[in-house]
Image (tube, rainbow, N blue to C red):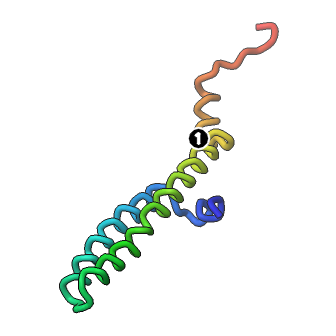
C-alpha cells in the first residue's frame, strides 16, 4: 500500500499535513457540535474523538512514506547523482 501511495505522488509531508489538519478539524468539530447541537457535551465529545482518531493514522502513514522515500534514495540513486560522481572522480587510464 505504501509503495502504491508513493507511486501516486503522495509524500510523507502530505500525510503530516493531513494529520495536523485532522487535529484542527477535531477541535473545530467539537466546538461546532457543542455550540450548534442541542444533544449536549457527550455528542460533541464523540465528534471530536471521531475526527481526532484520524491524526495518528495519518502520522503513521507519513512515517512509513518517509521510510519508503529514504529507502528509494539509498537503493536507486538518481541520474544526477551518478553524473555528479562521474565529474568528481578523475578517470585513470592504464599505462598513463
Q: Residue at x 18, y 84 (%)?
A: 35
In what quadrant of the picture does the N terminus appear?
bottom right
Q: Is residue 63 left or right of residue 87?
A: left
Q: Nearer the viewer, residue 92 or 24?
A: 24
Please say if 73 is above or below 33.
above
Q: Quadrant of residue 43?
A: bottom left
Please say if 38 is above or below 56.
below
Q: Is residue 3 left or right of residue 15?
A: right
Q: Nearer the viewer, residue 31 or 72?
A: 31
- Residue reaching furthest right? 95
Q: Residues within 10 Å of mark 1 (few under 14, many from 20)?
A: few
Residue 49 lies, in percent from the top left, at: 37, 72
Q: Residue at x 59, y 40 (%)?
A: 80
- Residue reaching furthest left? 35
Q: Nearer the viewer, residue 92 or 33?
A: 33
Q: Nearer the viewer, residue 45 or 90?
A: 45
What number of labels is visible? Answer: 1
Q: Is residue 96 left or right of residue 79?
A: right
Q: Residue at x 51, y 57 (%)?
A: 60
**What SS does tag 1 mark?**
helix
In what quadrant of the picture does the C terminus appear?
top right
Residue 87 lies, in percent from the top left, at: 60, 27
Residue 71 lies, in percent from the top left, at: 63, 44
Disc 1 marks which residue? 80
- Residue reaching furthest top? 95
Amino acid at each position: 500500500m505504501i509503495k502504491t501511495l508513493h507511486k501516486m505522488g503522495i509524500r510523507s509531508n502530505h500525510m503530516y499535513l493531513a494529520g495536523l489538519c485532522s487535529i484542527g478539524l477535531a477541535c473545530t468539530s467539537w466546538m461546532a457540535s457543542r455550540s450548534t447541537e442541542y444533544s449536549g457535551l457527550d455528542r460533541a465529545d464523540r465528534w471530536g474523538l471521531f475526527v481526532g482518531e484520524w491524526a495518528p493514522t495519518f502520522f503513521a502513514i507519513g512515517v512509513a512514506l518517509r521510510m519508503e522515500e529514504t529507502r528509494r534514495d539509498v537503493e536507486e540513486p538518481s541520474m544526477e547523482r551518478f553524473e555528479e560522481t562521474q565529474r568528481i572522480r578523475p578517470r585513470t587510464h592504464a599505462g598513463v
